[in-house]
Image: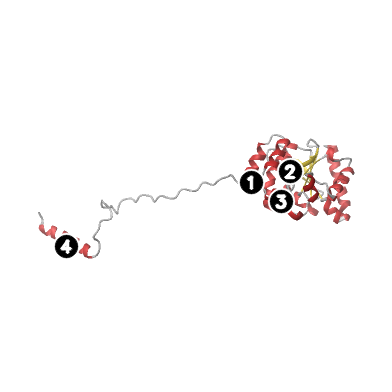
Amino acid sequence: MNTAGAGDALAALRWLADSGADEAIEAAPRDRFATPEPTPTPSTPTIHADTPLAQATAAAQACQSIAELAEAVAGFDGCALKRTAKNTVFADGDPEADLMLIGEAPGADEDRTGVPFVGAAGRLLDRMLAAIGRDRSSAYITNIVFWRPPGNRNPTPEEIALCLPFVERHVALANPRALAFVGGVAAKTLLERSEGITRLRGRWFNYAPAGMAQPIPAIALYHPAYLLRQPARKKEAWHDLLAIQARLENA
């Protein structure tokens, strides 16, 4: 036995003890030159898609008829506007008509009756349709938002986004030959454009909601409420109505 080696080891142990290293941390020595084990990383939290927008999208896409869509909209509670509105305002007119008009949002009269465009602006819209030989029985009318914003304010981008899956499905199911986006908010939203209504009106665009193989010709119109405030613009509105009439007659 090498007593000198044993004495050196004992001296080293005493030195470690005197330095405060008097307890073993692990049962076995660790090889510091070995490849270290990977440090475990925390698992990525699951992102749930069960948001109001996801619910609206799923509910809209599941509908195979306009009647089913009307029920889905009435049963959707994800939009805060529904909590302050009296009625869900879905649509009016003939869902099989070749002309579909999409406005902005219900007002006080629409909220009370549950029918779109029935106030002063609605009466003017009726006269506009009559000017090209139509009425509510030969057109289909809805909005991009189904509940009245408090105080008749403009709907917020979030409120519009929550209703948009239903609107897109509505157009796909109705499949009209022509669309009229009534007012700047509806036109900019559905056409995904930043220009105002004075630049968008009178021009034809192609609108293709999800689920449609062929785009639908779409034109922007001044909102009747705007025309009530700016009657000088009625001349331009008349030209746009004639363009709609010509498009449908020649299609």
Mark 3 lies on residue: 84
Of mark 4 and mark 3, the one earlier in the sequence is 4
Foreground mark, 4 or 3, reads 3
Judged from the image, the secondary structure of the residue bearing numbered disc 4 is: helix
Tell me the CA gap for discs 2 and 1.
22 Å
Foreground mark, 2 or 4, reads 4
Tell me the CA gap for discs 3 and 2.
32 Å
User: Tags 3 and 2 in contact by the CB under 8 Å rule?
Assistant: no
- Locate residue 181, reporting x and y percent: 78, 47
Of mark 3 and mark 2, the one earlier in the sequence is 3
Label 4: how many Cα within 10 Å (few below 14, some 14–19, many 20+) = few
- Locate residue 108, reporting x and y percent: 79, 51
- The disc placed on residue 224 is none
For the point 88% across and 46% down, the residue is: 127
Q: Give the number of marks.
A: 4
Tell me the CA gap for discs 1 and 3.
19 Å
Mark 2 lies on residue: 207
Mark 1 lies on residue: 53
Mark 4 lies on residue: 11
User: Tags 1 and 3 in contact by the CB under 8 Å rule?
Assistant: no
Tell me the CA gap for discs 1 and 4.
73 Å
Of mark 1 and mark 3, the one earlier in the sequence is 1
Foreground mark, 1 or 4, reads 1
The amino acid beneath tag 4 is Ala
